[in-house]
Amino acid sequence: MSLEILDQLEEKIKQAVETIQLLQLEIEEKNEKIQALEQEKNETQQTNDNLRRENESLKNEHSNWQERLRSLLGKIDNV
């Protein structure tokens, strides 16, 4: 009877070890996915920052052109 109990215990231990190994693999996969998502987030954030700077530059350029046009139109009106 005790040999039977030991066999059952051994089987449960084997199952527990297999479950732990599977969970460790899942954790590794999740960690890899997290790293990939963090990398993607950083790249997206950098792209966003670059686009914001470009947008600000274009707004300034647009404003400068408007000012030039107003100045030229003012000169034309004076003629």
Image (tube, helix red, strand yellow):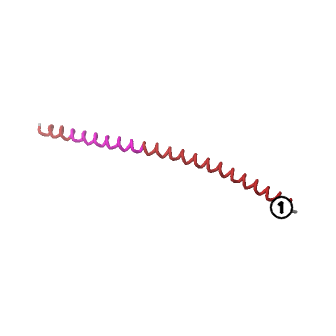
Where residue 52 sits: x, y (%)? 37, 44
In this rendering, is residue 21 above or below 4?
above
Where residue 26 sits: x, y (%)? 64, 50
Task: Indicate the secondary structure of the residue bearing disc 1.
Answer: helix
Q: Nearer the viewer, residue 8 or 37?
A: 8
Q: Quadrant of the N terminus?
A: bottom right
Q: Is residue 62 found left or right of 20 in the rendered image? A: left
Q: Nearer the viewer, residue 30 or 4?
A: 4
Q: Which amino acid, mark 1? A: Ile
Residue 57 is one of the magenta-drawn residues: yes
Within 10 angstroms of label 1, few (less than 14), some, or many (20 or more) residues?
few
Q: Is residue 69 found left or right of 55 in the rendered image? A: left
The residue shown at (42%, 43%) is 46
Magenta stretch, residue numbers: 47-69
In this rendering, is residue 15 above or below 64?
below
The residue shown at (46%, 44%) is 44
The single residue placed furthest to the left in the displayed view is 79
Residue 8 is one of the magenta-drawn residues: no
Q: How would you classify the magenta stretch by its main secondary structure?
A: helix
In this rendering, is residue 45 above or below 7?
above
In this rendering, is residue 57 above or below 13?
above
Where residue 35 sits: x, y (%)? 54, 46
Where residue 65 sits: x, y (%)? 25, 39
Q: Quadrant of the C terminus?
A: top left
The single residue placed furthest to the right in the displayed view is 1
Q: Which residue is mark 1?
A: 5
The residue shown at (75%, 56%) is 13
